[in-house]
Image (cartoon, grey):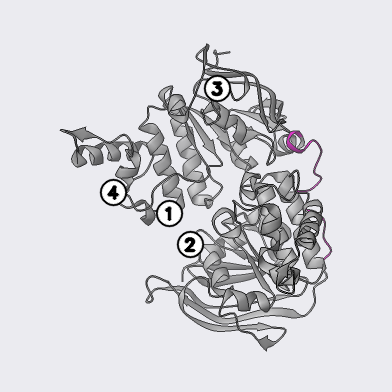
Amino acid sequence: MTDPILRTSGITKRFHGIPALSDVSLDVAPGEVHAICGENGAGKSTLMKVLSGVHPAGSFEGSIELDGSEVSFRSLSDSEAHGIVIIHQELALIPGLSVAENLFLGNEVLRGGLIDWRETNERAAELMARAGLDENPTALVSELGVGKQQLVEIAKALSKDVRILILDEPTAALGAADSERLLELIDHLRTQGITCIVISHKLREVLQVADRITVIRDGEVVETMRRDDPETNEGRIIRAMVGRDLDSLFPPRDPDIGDELLRVENWRVHHPADPERVVIDDVSFSVRAGEIVGLAGLMGAGRTELAMSIFGRSYGSRISGSVFKNGEHIDVGTVRRAIDNGIAYATEDRKQHGLNLVGDIQENISSVALRRLTRGGLLDLFRERKIADAYRYKMNVKAPNVAAITGNLSGGNQQKIVLSKWLFANPDVLILDEPTRGIDVGAKYEIYGFINELAAQGKAIVLISSELPEILGLADRIYALASGRITGEVARADATQERLMRCMTAGR
């Protein structure tokens, strides 16, 4: 076997005395794609922060070797000087700057003490071409979709003479087409001699692109397997991740569907910045008590825009149409009125819009229904803590107590806090926008169980997901959207990925 380009030996990292990594040893071969899999909180991101100098030498035990020699990284720039570059799940780009400006931010191309814009744009174009991006270097990052922004991050890494590229959940926010392009680029980088370490919960993608797969559970390396091993499959990876077999990716459910609970008629939404542009065009749909209705569509189809506009008109302009609950017209003109009418919306962007990341678990869970916890105008802190504790246990949130800061939790546990917040509000209709984005298969299974439990209580569930297997595995009925219009309605018994994709790609 070729000598490894990177090796860790006995890496142990503790936070407040609690081990996040325990004696982690692994090696990465030059030019390979090495996937790191594990449940949320398993220690994957902590390990990557150790490798990239975010957690500096001296803050952990063990050693790191690069090309056979021990190295000590004291900062992110230190690891980058050795050719190790990390791209985090939350992209670190400045929307108001151009692509070229982002690529050379902090490393400007100077001539005579001034920025040489011609040289900057020419070099940017070369880097963008290597990353498979054909945009103008002067285009603003804010004008690009998430998929292309991810490619800008890779082009930025290439500008730093990267040898080892670490990608943390690179396709978590991407649709199928953008994900496929990114995986092809990772494969292409391998041919250029760039070693890639990929953290991902999407096991199909892992099996598509990785040469080897290392599974971490509870801060320890459980197993490293080769993709070309006949015994390597999703089931084997899942067993290693969760320490048990999952007989099915979706928990069993016997639907008990009642009368129509929510109906939306002739819903039309215009773009908030361009009132002449129609984003949602004459959409009508319904959902019954105890029913899970899926909204399927490609990136840009209008699913999130539809959900946000219904939830207190929190997106769009010149909104028209009607919303009925139990057959009666209701006012959803503000978020407060939507909540008061029993409608909840769990956003796809939990970090920016779903949670107060600097607040603790207790504050986040109680935030949308504080009136239920006040007596004489004062907040009952004892009752607030008691309720938050109950949800922490019910949702199996991995945190020492409800005073833990929400921003320090893993993605799966943060998502459980989002759901807890809305469960405490006790809505009749719950719109879930990408409820399992960026979380592992074990946490997904738990959240699927909570969704089924809500449906069994008679709640009406609207499920938005970019993963068609998830829609097919949970929904009783599915609406497909394309270009802001509903292009198909399919019962669960008749739904297939092929049929849904035909609807999702239908023209206006």
User: For the residues marked 4 and 3, what is the alpha-carbon distance in whole angstroms?
Assistant: 40 Å
Residue at 67% x, 26% y is 225
Give the residue number, with chain letter if any, for mark 2: 300
**Which badge, 2 or 1, comes first in the chain's sequence?**
1
Amino acid type, residue under disc 4 in the picture: Asn
User: For the residues marked 4 and 2, what is the alpha-carbon distance in whole angstroms?
Assistant: 22 Å
Amino acid type, residue under disc 2 in the picture: Gly
Give the residue number, with chain letter if any, for mark 3: 57
Is-magenta flag for residue 259? no
Amino acid type, residue under disc 3 in the picture: Ala
Residue at 45% x, 38% y is 185
Give the residue number, with chain letter if any, for mark 1: 145
Over which residues does the magenta segment extend?
240-255
Q: In this view, does 91 lie above or below 453?
A: above
Of residue 189 and residue 495, the one placed in the foreground of this image is: 189
Local SS, label 4: loop
User: For the residues marked 3 and 1, what is the alpha-carbon distance in whole angstroms?
Assistant: 37 Å
Q: Is residue 35 above or below residue 331?
A: above
- The main secondary structure of the magenta stretch is loop
Residue at 78% x, 61% y is 452
